[in-house]
Every structure is written in C-alpha cells, then in structure tokens.
Image (tube, coloured by chain):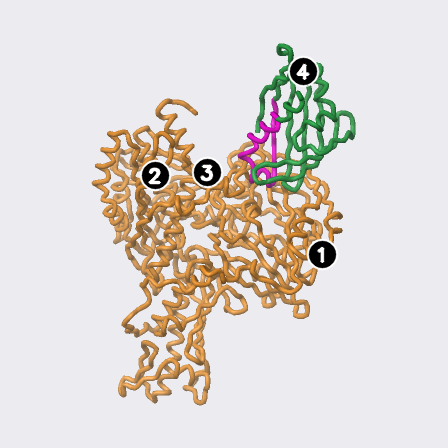
Chain colours: A orange, B green
Amino acid sequence: MATPSITKLEPFIGKRIRRKEDPRLITGTATYVDDLQLPGMHFAVVVRSPHGAARIKSVDIAAAAAMKGVAMVLTGRDVADLACVPCGASLPGLRVPEHRLLAQDRVYYVGHPVAVVVATDRYIAKDAAEAVEVDYEVLQAVADPEKALAPGAPAVHPQWPDNTAFTFHQEGGDIEKAFAEADVVVKQRITSQRLIPSPLETRGCVAQWHAAEKSLTLHTSTQVPHLVRSLLAQMLGLDENRVRVVAPEVGGGFGCKLNLYAEEALTSHVAMKLGKPIKWIESRRENFLTTIHGRGHVDYYEVAAKKDGTILGIKVKIIQDLGSYHQLLGPAIPTLSVLMIPGLYRAKSMCADVVGVFTNCVPTDAYRGAGRPEATHGIERMVDILAAELKMDPAELRLKNFVRNEEFPFPTATGLIYDTGDYAAPLRKAMETVNYTELRKQQADARKHGKLMGIGMSTYGEICAFGPSPATPAGGWESATVKIEPSGKVTVMTGVSPHGQGEETTFSQITADHLGVPFEDVLVQHGDTAIVQYGIGTFGSRATAVGGPALYYAIQELIIKIKKFGAMLLESDDVSYANGQCTCAKTGKSVSIKEIAGAAYRAMKLPANTEPGLVATYFWEPTNFTFPFGAHIMVAEVDPGTGAIDIKRYVAIDDCGNLINPLVVDGQVHGGVAQGLGQALWEQAVYDDNAQLVSGEFMDYTMPRAHMMPWIESGHTITPTPVNPLGVKGVGEAGTIGASPAAVSAVVDALSPLGVRHIDMPMTPEKIWRLILSKTTGSNA
Amino acid sequence: MKISGTNTLALAPEEAYRRMQDPVVLAACMPGCESLETIGEDEYRMKMKLAMASLSGAFEGKVRITDRTPAGFRLIVEGTGKLGFMKGEGLLTFSQSGDGTEVAYEGDVQVGGTIAAVGQRLIDATAKMMIKRFFEKLAA
C-alpha cells in the first residue's frame, strides 16, 4: 500500500471538534426505535415469570385472547419448533442449555419470557398480558454462584446438578517454581459484583414482514446490526439477503446490546405470522430483569513475590456467575479476564482456573470492559496488598514490575504479545499531577489529626481493538466504503455501528485529512445492513482502532483511482494528489476532486483499465490486538462518623495512542470513569435467596449521577501502536477499567491505619461505616 | 423476610382465638381485603388490594389456617396478581396477659416479581404496618 503524500496545512485529526451527532441528540430530533410509526403497526408485550425457578403447570390465554384488540397470544408450545437463542462462545465441554424464545415447561429466572401478547396498541397489549394466567409450581432457586457450586444446591438445569457450565484452565511459565522461590505470598478473595448496564434507551425493536418478497426488516436497538441479521436469518430460516437490520439512533449499549435477544426473534416471528408490523419496547423494569447483566465474579488470588517486590507469579481461581442461560458471548467473558491477568507486569508465570456457574438469574455477558475490568481490578488490588505486606510504596512496587520499554513487543505468560508501551509514563505523569510526594506528607499530617485520607492508584492495561479474527466469534475485521459522489461530496459507509462513540465526527476527520476534502463534505453512514456493505459492529474498543484503519485503506485505494483520472485530465503521467487536488509536477496545473468526480461519473473518457465511478471498499483484518494502558490516581477522605467517601481528586492519564479527537476521547474517559466509580461505590444487582432481583429500580440500584461525580482531571501520554496505520488503540473501556481499582485503593489506603487491606465493592457508606466500627470497637453493628 | 412480634389485645384469650379464625372478622380486619369466601375447612379464597411504594395492585389467593393447637395456629396468606406474588406465613400463639391476651407471631414473608424488584426495601415497614392495623381493627 502506497503511503499518502498529504501536506495539508490544517489537519482535522487531533483537534477538539464538536460532534456532528450532537445537534440532533440535544434537540430531540434523533429517531430511536420507539419513534418509528408504521401503518397497521401492532404492539407486543411479553408475559414474564415472577419466580426464579418454577415448573409451568398450565398457561391459560383464553381471557387475554378474548380481549378486544388482541390479535395474537403465543406460548412456549407455539415456538417449540423455532431455533434457540444462539450462544457464540465456544469452549471445550461447554454445556449449552436450550434457550427457547419462550419458556417451555420450566422457568429459570425472574423475568423469563413465558408468553407474548400482540394487540393493536401497547396499552391493550399490557392489559391482556396481565390477563394471561400461568399456574406455577415453585421450585427451589439459587442465586449465589458459590452456593450454587455447593453440594446439594438446587439444580438450575436438572440435567446438570453440579450447576457447572464449564471449567477452563490456562497456565504459562512455571507457576510451581515461581511459588517455590517466593519470599512472600499474598492471598485475597476479591469480588466483582453483578451490575446492570442500564443504557438510557432500553432495548426495543420493530419488525416488518414483506410477504410478497419474503423479506423482513427489523429496526432494533443494537451494537451489531450485521451480526443480528445473520443470526436472525438462521433462526427464522430466512435468506440472509432478505433480512434487513437497521440500528437507528441507539441510546447506549455498553455491551448489553452486543447480542441477539429472544425478543428480537419473537417480534420478527410474530410479524411474519400476523403479517403486521410489530413493535416491542422493553420497559425499564424489564430492562433491570431481562437484559444481560455484567461482571459477577468471585475470584481467589495468590501472588508470589521476592522480598524486593519482584512479582514472580500469579494464581487465580475465577468463579463466574453466568446466570441461567448463555447469551451471545457470556461464557467467553471470563476467558478474557484470564488473558488480562498479567496486567502491565513482567511476571512470567501465571495459572488460572475458571468455573462458569449456572444460577437462577438473568445471564451475564459483556459489559463495558468485558472480563478485563474484573482482572485489572483483581491484579491491581493484589499489587496494593503486596505493597502493604512488603511495606513498600505502591507506586514504587508498580514501577519496579512494569514491562520495560525495550521489551516490546512483549510476550505475556498468557500468550498475548503486547504491542507497545511506556507503562511508567502515565503513572509518573499522574504522580506529578497530584504532586505525589507532597501528598504523602499531607496524608501523614492528616493521619496525625485523626483524618482518614487515602491516596489510591491503578495502572491498568487493556486488550482492545477486537480483534484478529481467530480471537472473535464472528470475524474481527472491519470494513469501510468511501464513495465520492458526482458532486465531489464524500459518503463513508462503515461497518462499525456507533451508538454514542462519535464516529460520524471522528471518521469525518480521518476522511478529511487523508482524502483531503472539507470536513463538512463528509457524511458517515452506519447501522443499516441495506446500506453498509458488511460489518462486525461496535464493541471491545474496536470502532476507531479497526474501523478507522479500514477507512484509511479504502481512502488509499480510492486515491489511486483519483490519480488515474487526474492524470488523464491533466494529460500527464506524473501527478500527485493532496488537499483535494491532483497536480501535474511538470506544468503545475491541477484539477479538483470535484472535477475529477464529474469526469469519473460522466465517463466521456476513461483511463486505461479503469471503470467509471469513484468508490472503494476495504475490509481490514488486524494482525494483533492493541494494548492501551494508563494510570488513575484518586485522593479521598472518609468520614469516620458516616462512612461517606469524599473524592478530593481524580486524575486519569490514559495512553490510547494517537488521539483523533481529544474531545471525544475525554468524553469516553469521563463516561468510563463514571461507570467504574459506579461499580466501586454504589452499583450492585442484588438477588435474594429466592432469586428475586431486589435492586430492580433506580431507587435501589444506585446509578451515578452528575452531582455524585468528582471533577475528572484527564490527560494523556501518547504511544502510537504499530498495529495500524493510524496509531490508534481504542479508549471506549479505559475509564471503566482504570477507575474501580483506583477507587478501592484510595479508600483502603484511607482505612489502612485501622488494619484494612481490602474492601469489596460497592463501597457504600453503610459498608464503610460498619467496617470502621468493627475495626475501632470490635463491634459488628 | 422474617417477621416476629407481639401484640396485646384487650380481649380474653378465648375470644381473641375465636375472632382470629372467623372469616367475617378476618375479612374486616385484614388491610386491603375485599372479599373472603369459604372454599373448604379452614381454607378461604381471598381478594385483596395491596399498596406499597409506588405500586398498588389486586391480588387473588388463599387464606389457610393450619397446625391448630389449643395455644394457637398457623395463618397462611398467599396471593398472585399483576405485580407478582406474595406469601406470608405466621405462627400465632395466644396467652393470658393481665386482663387481655398477648398474641405472639413469628413467620416469614416472601414476595416476587415486580413487587420484589421495586418494593423490597419497604416490605418490612409495610408488613409491620399491616399487622398493626390488623390488630387495631381486631380489638375494635
């Protein structure tokens, strides 16, 4: 591939350009699924189980079906012949329960779909759904993954009484030797609680069946429209090219819309049966109960080290709460945790054992960071615990163990190859920002006055830019088409499916610079399988780091063709292309991209062996992941009387390689930090002993709000990746991964004079208050 | 959720014991009870309305009396409705206390579905309030 010869004076890449997306979002003119209205549209409502585990004795639909306006009621029996909801994760020996669109003879979690009611409007449908009478024989349920593994626990799926979906083992280096040679071994149980992703827009879809063409159009709130199309076509027995999936404006995903859900297939099935457009919109209460949850880890760590702080080896046992079924990627998520176990450290020996556990809860799956925050949280907590054990400064211990700059590309004990890094740089920058040495002195002073002040840190690594195809379930490449219209305007069609990440803006910047056209002339289209060639979608911090290079290479192909037309028009073989102009080196004459486009489409004359038109498509396959990194420092004060945590400072220094748009990057970091702090301080999905979700609304599930957030001081170091020509690494998940360990580190540091070494999340004031009380008075209030 | 407590009634133990098994009295005293009809020995079909937090809804179910001894009996109330289900079970024991009767109760309340997801943190307070009202009406 030829390198571009662009000498643009004012590049767009690297500028804080306001997002093209925002005017429609902030003026309320964006079109979400629920904004769609189609003639004759009916509305579907799902009847759901109120029990965590029960046998269905009977379902009586007579009263519901008889209600005026009700068009159809389907129960499990009616969909027994349809394919199951697919699981894309493949692990040796994985037990995959049959995940039917509606429950058959048993329900496995609260919220399990039992019947679907379709009516002329949503209110009738809701009333009719309440009239469906289901007779249940309630069975014993189990919600806690450790209890589910205990002998004699109720079996979630009766055919698998041990509740074990899979076990997975990976090791690297020589773990026996590492522990044999250790001067010190630290151990800790560390949990990463269940979380509810809670996008602002819940799930929803509108299905329309075109009977004469045997084709289906599904508008759905998804991160992966092409994947939904392929899977849905398979499930419903339709030709893939006769299924069109559109992701209109999507109000947040965070991984929970990286899936094919039963309701998407069910709505489509009903539309096909009834011959009417069908809308299904998930209520907020349904969203809590039935959209995938994230995390759900109980981990047991052991770290072996020398007296001088050199980390030798890491052992971990991971218990992953999978819930009752597998959604698309659920069982694969903890294997990503395993890959991430070495963190940023040189330790060459590791050993991980994962057990995936069925519980009577909604399935867990990818949630912002997907497996990597769990591992980073664990390993960063362990490094802090080791520092406390060795009475070393936690920053010093980290600096001692970081992979050194000259060691890249660095092969890890888990078989990855870290592309590039300067791991000390963001930590040093964060330490300078807070004036670390001075801060430690202030802390010593504050302690003398009885104040509980803490300085916490995390130095995180990530696996981003998913990914090389062998490492992903449906291909890890990405695609782009660049089309110069006859007028010279530029349309980009990308296979990624942005839903808040701002690629309409950042991809316009890339196109403006590399194609040499005005930023305003570029239109980025996405999220419609009838418009976009094909694509994988947006997840795993991949859009800019895989979709961006695909766009870059499509532009390079297009420039070759532009130059052919330019040479023809300038009647010269020696032309260069820059800033939207083809210029003849000899004569200095030039033609604009607009003139070239006109000639390419008018096609009065064509260059040799060249087709008319100016369109190029590129499918780009990365050779490796990218491995962004960074350092977060949080300073906090704990109120000993109330357990309240006051965040004094929050510094996030991230290295995601080159920044296309620092404004967008900051937005990603801020949102990520908010979600990480949400987990660290407030959020927790709680199921009781009967597997009832008791944190089922925002009164009980504490989402972070603006006034609860600290001022985030964000900064960057820039170490471009060699994996792609843009040098970008991805930043969608960075904030989330860095934040939770930094926050726990700060609070533990504040309470360390009381003998506290670790606190599990969420660190609610009540939990902290009880902990302080038990440490100071021995009371277990 | 476990519930337990005591309540003193200005009634003789025999009278308290009798009233608390009388469907007419039960229907009048159980908060939200709209109807109670006998369907068998010590078994009644019940319709009730329950309001808790932002929720209110109708429940249909059964009231049963079991484990009858001279000292007391077990009262079981279960219902389902569009908000989910509820099940309460309590062992009631009666003993002389001065001129009146001390009724001790010990039991368990379970809720499921929307009512659990949304109202869990209020169940304790709601159950206590309902028990208090029940005894107030019973003594009246």
- Callout 3 and callout 1 share a chain: yes
Chain of the residue that carries numbered disc 4 in the rendered image:
B
Identified by mark 3, the residue type is Val
Q: Which residue is mark 1?
A: A71
- Tell me whether the residue at label 3 lies in contact with that at label 4, contact meaning CB atoms closer than 8 angstroms: no
Chain of the residue that carries numbered disc 3 in the rendered image:
A
Q: Secondary structure at mark 4?
A: loop
Q: Which residue is mark 4?
A: B11
Residues packed near mark 1 inside 10 Å, few (<14), some (14 to 19) or many (20 plus): some
Q: Which residue is mark 2?
A: A646
Main SS, magenta residues: helix
Residue A724 shown left or right of residue B58 in the figure = left
- Tell me whether the residue at label 2 lies in contact with that at label 1, contact meaning CB atoms closer than 8 angstroms: no
- Callout 2 and callout 3 share a chain: yes
Residue A708 appearing in the image: yes
Chain of the residue that carries numbered disc 1 in the rendered image:
A
In magenta, the rendered stretch is: B106-132
Q: Which residue is mark 3?
A: A298
**Closer to viewer: mark 2 or mark 3:** 2
- Tell me whether the residue at label 4 lies in contact with that at label 2, contact meaning CB atoms closer than 8 angstroms: no
Q: Look at the image and say whether residue A372 sits in the magenta stretch.
A: no
Residue A174 appearing in the image: no
Identified by mark 2, the residue type is Asp
Q: Residue at x 54, y 42 (%)?
A: A696
Q: Quadrant of the C terminus of chain A?
A: top left
